[in-house]
Image (cartoon, grey):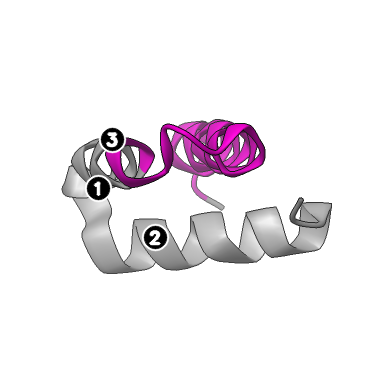
Amino acid sequence: MMSDRDIWVKAGAIVAEHGTLTAKYIISQLGDVIDDNMAVEDWRRIASAVDAIVDAPLQ
């Protein structure tokens, strides 16, 4: 299982790299790990962090 820090770092990198296609990228990754419950949980947490990043007000 990934640490909270690793989750946020990964989420930030995904948003920076994939922008508006972030959801599509995460869905494709889930397809690759569907049999691994721990990996699915990590990707669920990453998706939640991505949502928080995308929904955050601009500073």
The residue to which callout 2 is attached is 14
Give coordinates of residue 50: x percent, y percent.
49, 42
Q: Residues within 10 Å of mark 1 (few under 14, many from 20)?
A: some
Residue at 36%, 66% in the rendered image: 16
Residue 56: give x, y in percent of width and height.
55, 37
Mark 2 residue type: Ile
The kind of residue tagged 1 is Tyr
Q: How many marks?
A: 3
Report the residue at 78% width, 61% height from top.
Answer: 5
Q: In what element is the residue under mark 2?
A: helix
Residue indicated by mark 1: 25
Element carrying mark 3: helix
Instruction: Look at the magenta stretch and give its main secondary structure.
Output: helix
State the residue in front, 40 or 56.
40
Q: Compare marks 3 and 2 and give the one earlier in the sequence.
A: 2
Question: Which numbered circle lies on residue 27?
Answer: 3
**Relative vertical location of residue 3 with respect to residue 20 in this rendering, above or below:** below
Disc 2, disc 1: CB below 8 Å? yes
Q: Nearer the viewer, residue 52 or 34?
A: 34
The reply to whether the C-beta atoms of the residues labelled 1 and 3 are less than 8 Å apart is: yes
The residues tagged by marks 1 and 3 sit, at their Cα atoms, a distance apart of: 5 Å
As measured in the structure, the alpha-carbon distance from the residue carrying label 3 to the one carrying label 2 is 12 Å
What residue lies at 37% left-to-right and 38% top-to-bottom?
Answer: 30
Crowdedness near tag 2: few (<14), some (14–19) or many (≥20) residues, C-alpha within 10 Å: some
Task: Say which element carries label 1.
Answer: helix
**Residue 3 percent across, percent down from the top left:** 82, 57
55 shown above or below 49 = above
Asked whether disc 3 touches disc 2, contact meaning CB atoms under 8 Å apart, the reply is: no
What amino acid does circle 3 point to?
Ile
Sequence-wise first label, 2 or 1? 2
In the drawing, does residue 48 fall left or right of residue 6?
left
Magenta stretch in the rendered image: 30-58
